[in-house]
Amino acid sequence: MASELSRKPCSEASKPCGTLAAADCIKSPPECAKDTSVGKVLFTRLVWTCQQGYLHSNNIVVVPEAIGSLVKLQCLDLSDNALEIVCPEIGRLRALRHLRLANNQLQFLPPEVGDLKELQTLDISTNRLLSLPERLHLCLSLQYLTVDRNRLRCVPRHLCHLPSLNELSMAGNRLAFLPLDLGRSRELQYVYVDNNIHLKGLPSYLYNKVIGCSGCGAPIQVSEVKLLSFSSGQLTVFLPAEVKAIGTENDHVLPLQELAMRSLHHTYHSFLKDLNFLSPISLPRSLLELLHCPLGHCHRCSEPMFTIVYPKLFPLRETPMAGLHQGRTPVSFVAYCCSAQCLQTFDLLS
């Protein structure tokens, strides 16, 4: 569990003059719990000079558009409400540093959350989220992210590019795989994925990081999860849906599509720096997106990968980290390589 995020980033113990707590607002009777006007009443009491807002435990269902006018707000606590919708106007809170939305009923976050460039901590645990917005990776100051106890089945690979992210907690979801590049950033030091029962593979970038993976890798029939998978002995690991093929040590020639994508990517980064040189109809949209954000980077040589990976399993219980996990976890580290040569020469302990 995320240690930093378990504590409120802003304390109500000593409120500065620019702080508004729920107690300062008009309380709503229980029969108004599902009335969106309740939220409006509370937010209209927030003056534009307010820097911290504590509106937890108020049966608020909707964050109203008026929130966008609180341009100086730095800390907003809306946890323990009945939130079903967060309006796009929350993206206007350009000074916001700490946002708590835990213990609500949110099924999605607006993409505009990615406009919060100063955001440092985001707690959206215990909701009903099915996915995270890709634009979340634009929160360049984000250091602590917790999405525990939701319904996530995947995590956008774009989140691997968060330059300041230090701690990521995704315990108690429905994850079957993790982005190939998760842990590649040196800033990311703490990753918690406990109690994702379908999750059996951790990217080898997470080796030597602080990880929590208890309750992962429960026995399951491969047919129960409709994802590409590969096996080594009795171990089976699922792969992201974007992976189209799995290479082996005996494959010495890359698929034509992979060769073309790597060539285009090299041209883009070496000379043009602008994908507008490609006609909008020259590539399918999915491949254009991969050129902007590759599937992953080789864990051996850092070459970008787009459609094919060469995986290699290292059971955690056979590594020096086994003692930290009582040697019982069925989870494995997975090295994702770009070629048969890198696959043969990769060493997890080097």
Image (tube, rainbow, N blue to C red):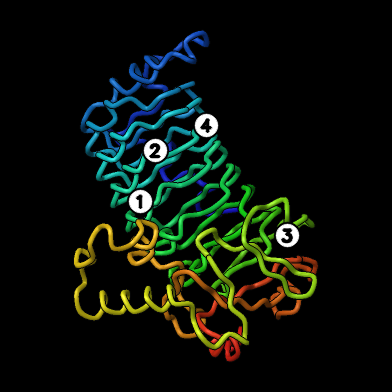
Q: Earlier in the sequence, mark 4 or mark 3?
A: 4
Marker disc for residue 135? 1
Q: Against 255, is 44 above or below?
A: above
Do the CB atoms of the residues marked 2 and 3 lie less than 8 Å apart?
A: no
Q: Earlier in the sequence, mark 2 or mark 3?
A: 2
Q: Quadrant of the C terminus?
A: bottom right
Identify which residue is drawn at 39% across, 58% down: 286
Identify which residue is drawn at 39% across, 28% down: 21
Q: Earlier in the sequence, mark 2 or mark 1?
A: 2
- Quarter holding residue 281: bottom left
Percent x, y of residue 7: 51, 46
Marker disc for residue 23? none
Instruction: Determine crowd level at label 3: few under 14, some 14-19, many 20+ residues with C-alpha closer than 10 A.
Output: many
**Residue toward you, 187 or 305:** 305
Residue type for callout 3: Gly
Query: Does the rendering let one see residue 183?
Result: yes
Q: Which residue is mark 2?
A: 14
Q: Earlier in the sequence, mark 1 or mark 4?
A: 4
